[in-house]
Amino acid sequence: MSNTPLTPGIVSARLVPEAYAHNFDDLDPVLDAHEAHVAADRCYFCHDAPCITACPTSIDIPLFIRQIATGTAEAAAKTIWDQNIMGGMCARVCPTEQLCEEACVREAAEGKPVEIGRLQRFATDRVMEKGVHPYTRAAATGKRVAVVGAGPAGLACAHRLAMHGHDVVVMDRRAKPGGLNEYGIASYKTPHDFAQSEVEWLLKIGGITVKTGVELGRDVTLDGLRADYDAVFLGIGLGGVNALRAAGEDLRGVRDAVDFIAELRQQPDKSMLGIGRDVVVIGGGMTAVDAAVQSRLLGAQNVTIVYRRAQEKMSASSHEQDHAQQVGVRIICNAAPVEVIGVGGAVSAVEFAYTEDGPEGLKLLADTFTLKADQVFKAIGQTLVAPEGLAGPKLDVTPMAKVWTGGDCGMGGEDLTVTAVAEGRDAAEAIHASFGA
Amino acid sequence: MQVLGPKGDTMADLTTNFIGIKSPNPFWLASAPPTDKEYNVRRAFKAGWGGVVWKTLGSEGLPVVNVNGPRYGAVWGADRRLLGLNNIELITDRPLEVNLREIKQVKRDWKDRAMIISLMVPCDEESWKDILARIEDTEADGVELNFGCPHGMAERGMGSAVGQVPEYIEMVTRWVKQHSRMPCIVKLTPNISDIRKPAEAAKRGGADAVSLINTINSITSVNLDSFSPEPMIDGKGTHGGYCGPAVKPIALNMVAEIARSEATRGLPISGIGGVTTWRDAAEFMALGAGNVQVCTAVMTYGFKIVEEMISGLSQYMDEKGMVSTADLVGKAVPNVTDWQFLNLNYVTKARIDQDACIGCGRCFAACEDTSHQAISMSEDRVFEVMDDECVACNLCVNVCPVEDCIEMVELPKGALDERTGKKVGDYANWTTHANNPSVSAAE
C-alpha cells in the first residue's frame, strides 16, 4: 500500500486494512442486557405517550420498553413488529432524535430522552438472532398481489398481505431485494449485511415470491400487472436524480452520491474503492451527509459539504450533521455551485457563489469562492421516474383501480424508512379490506 | 455547646447521650454482619460511626452454624437500587470468647464510641446470668436484648419467639436488670399486631430503652424456574428478616406509636429500619428516637455513608437553629394523632405547575382510571385539575415523576370548595361529625 490520505486524485487503499474494518463497523453497537435494563428503567410509561404519536408506525413504545424491563424481550420485539415489521432496520436508521426521542418527556425533563432506538434494536436483534419469526399466515385466500419495488414500503406491504393469507409476488429491478435499506443507507449504519438478513427473516412468513432484475416498463407493465393480479402495490421509490445545472457537470470525477453510496454498500472490501483526496459534496440531506462521512471513512483528506441554504434548512438531522463534523467533515452553507472546473477532462475545483435566501427565493451573490476538488458528489435530491400512464412529481394512483402506492414515490413519501414501512403496511390493510367486500 | 467546623463555621453538636451512653453522633451500626468482628468495627469507627451494637452473642458452647448457600434475598427498584433486603443469617457463628476478647480490645482503643453487646440466650435465668457475667469484663457500655430475629433462633424458642410474648420480655428484662449494672436496651420484633404491648412489657421489666424494628418476616421473591423462594438453599427457601429502605414506613409508625403512647411515653427509643441517609435519621429522631441504628445502607454502600449522614444532619440542624440532637428528638411526636382527630375542614386542591410539567400524563391516567376523574387532558397534552371533582387525595402528586410539579394548595377559611359547594369552615373532626353514629346516638 503506497497511497495515503494525501495522495492526489481518486485512488483506493488510502488507509491500512484495519482502519477500514474499524471505520465501517457498527457505529452504535447493540446494548447488552444490563445496559438495556438501565435504559428501560428510565421510561415513565406515559399515558397516551407522545413517543407513540411521534412514531410514523405508531409502535407502542412504553409497552415494549416495559416488556424489556420485565425481562421479556421476545414480547417486546413482537410489540414492535406488530406495527413495524422492519423495526430492526428502523432501530438503526430512524432519526429518533427528530421522532420518538424528541417527543420523549425525559427530553423535556432532562434533555436526555429514553434511548428508544437502541432499546428497539436490543429487542429486535435478540429475537432475530435466534431466527424466530413470530408470525404465521392466515388461511390462503387465493388472492394474488403484485408488489413492485422490494424496498421498505414494498416488503412491509408484502408481509402484511401474506399475513392475511394472500399470495404476493415482489419484483425489483436491482439484483437484491431491500431497496434503499440495501443500496441507499450508509454502510456503517447497517454493517454485517443486516439488510439482507432482515429481508430473509421477513420472508420466513411464507407466501411471498421475490423476483429480482425485473423492471417496471421494461420487463413488466402496469397494465399487464393489473390484468394478471388482484391488486398492485407500487413502491418504486425515486429512481432519478436531479442535475446540478452548472457547467462542467460531466467532467470525470463528478458523480451522483446515491451511486457512490450503493457501490460502497455492495463492495465487501472497502479498500478497493477509489476516493478523492479533496472531496466536495453538494447538497444538504442525509444522502449528502452519508456520502461525505463515508468519504472521510475511506481516507479522503478534505471533505466539504456545500449547501445552498442556511444550516437550519438542511434536511439532514442535527444529529447527523454533528456526526459528520465529528469525523472531520466541513459544512459550508449559503453557497451554490456556479461551475465545475476541470483539467484534462477531470474535475479539479468547484466555484461557488454565496447565496441569499430571501422572500423571492434563492439569489446568487457576486461574491464567489473556489474549492479544490478531485471528486465531487451530487446529492441534490432524487426524482420520480413515473411508470407509463402516471405522472410525477409524486404518484397519485387514487383514480386507478386495483393500484396502491407508498414509500418515497407516493404522495406521503418522506424519505424515511419508517414512513415507507407505515405506508406499505397501511396499503396492505387497504388492499385486504378491498378484497373483503 | 456550639462546635466550630474546620472553616470556623458553626456546627450543630451531634453528640448524644442515650441512656447514659455517650457517642459523638447518633449514628450507630445495628447488630448484624457489619458488627460481627473486630476488623469491621475498627474500620467502622475509623469511618466515623458513633457506636455499634455488636452482632448478637449466644451462650457459651458450640457456636451456631449458618447455611452455606445464599443468606440474602433482595428487592430492587429502578437502576437496581436495593430497596429491600432479607436474610436468613443467624446470630454470630464465632466462638464467644473470641468475640468477648475483640470487644474488649476495640472498646479500649475507642473509648469515645458506644459499644453495645447484643445478646440472645435460652429463656432461663441461669443462661442470662451466665452470659451477663461473661460480658461484664469487656467494659462495653450496655446490652441489647435480641427479641427480634424472626428466623432460625425463633424456632429454638429465642429471638422473636420471646419478642412476641410480652410476659417473656418482661421476665427476661427483669433478669437482666437484676444480674447486671449495664444499661439495657430491648430490641423489638415488628412481627406482632400491636407494638405497644412488647414495649410496655420491656418498660415494666425495667428496660432503659427499646430499639426497633428488627426485621420483618418475608419471602423476597420466588424463582419461577425452580419454583423455590429466594434466597434458595438446595431448592428450598424459608422466610427471612426483611429490612432496608422498604421497611422504613413500618418502622417509623411503630416508633411513633411507642413515643406517643401514654404507657411508654418518655421511654428512650433507638430507631432502626431502613435508615439510609441523614434525612431518614432525622425523621426517626423527630418521631422520638434518641439515636438510630443502621445496617442495610452500609451493607449496600459501605461505611463511608456516615460522612454524608454527619454533614447532612449538621447542616439541617444549623439551618433549623438546633444546637443539640435533643432539640430534634420527639419534635414531630405531638403531631402524630388518630384519624378521628384530623381536621375534616382542611381542604386542599391539587395544582399542576404547567412550566414544570413534562407532559407524561401519569397524573391523568391515575386520576382517570383509578380515582376521581378530576384531571383534564387537552389535545396538546395540557393537564389541569378540575376543582369541582378534586378530593385532594394526593395520588397525582405521588405518581408525578417531577418533584414539586404538582402541589396541594390549601383553601383558606371561608373559600368555596367547588366540589362540595360549601365554604371552608373551622376545625372540626369526626368525633363531632353528623355522620358519626356515636354522635347521632348521643343527640
Image: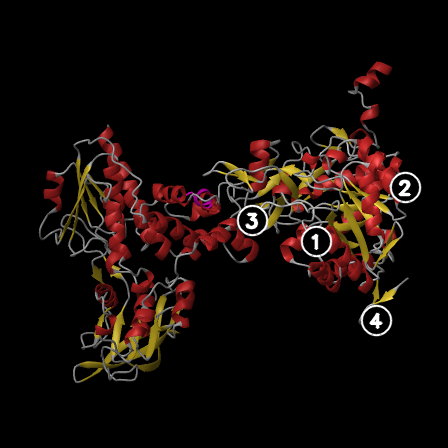
**Dominant secondary structure of the magenta stretch?**
helix
Please indicate, yes or no, whether residue A434 appears anywhere in the rendered image.
yes
Q: Which mark is residue B8?
A: 4
Using a 10 Å C-alpha cutoff, classify the residue at mark 2 as few (fewer than 14 neighbours), some (14 to 19) or many (20 or more).
few
Please indicate, yes or no, whether residue B343 appears anywhere in the rendered image.
no
Q: Is residue B196 left or right of residue A6?
A: right
Give the quadrant of residue B219. top right
Q: Is residue A143 left or right of residue B384?
A: left
Give the quadrant of residue B199. top right
Task: Decide which of B395, A200 is in the foreground and name it.
Answer: A200
Q: Position of residue B364 (x, y in %)?
A: 57, 38
Q: Position of residue A11 (x, y in %)?
A: 22, 79
Same subunit, labels 4 and 3: the answer reads yes
Q: Distance between the residues labelled 2 and 4?
A: 48 Å
Amino acid type, residue under disc 3 in the picture: Ala
Dot placed on the residue nearer the N-terminal end, 4 or 3: 4
Which dot, 2 or 4, sits closer to the camera? Answer: 2
Dots 3, 2 in contact, CB < 8 A: no
Using a 10 Å C-alpha cutoff, classify the residue at mark 3 as few (fewer than 14 neighbours), some (14 to 19) or many (20 or more).
some
Task: Decide which of B190, B42 is in the foreground and name it.
Answer: B42
Q: In this view, does B119 lie to the left or right of A217?
A: right
Residue A64 is one of the magenta-drawn residues: yes
Q: Quadrant of the C terminus of chain A?
A: top left
Residue denoted by label 1: B36
Q: Which mark is residue B78?
A: 3
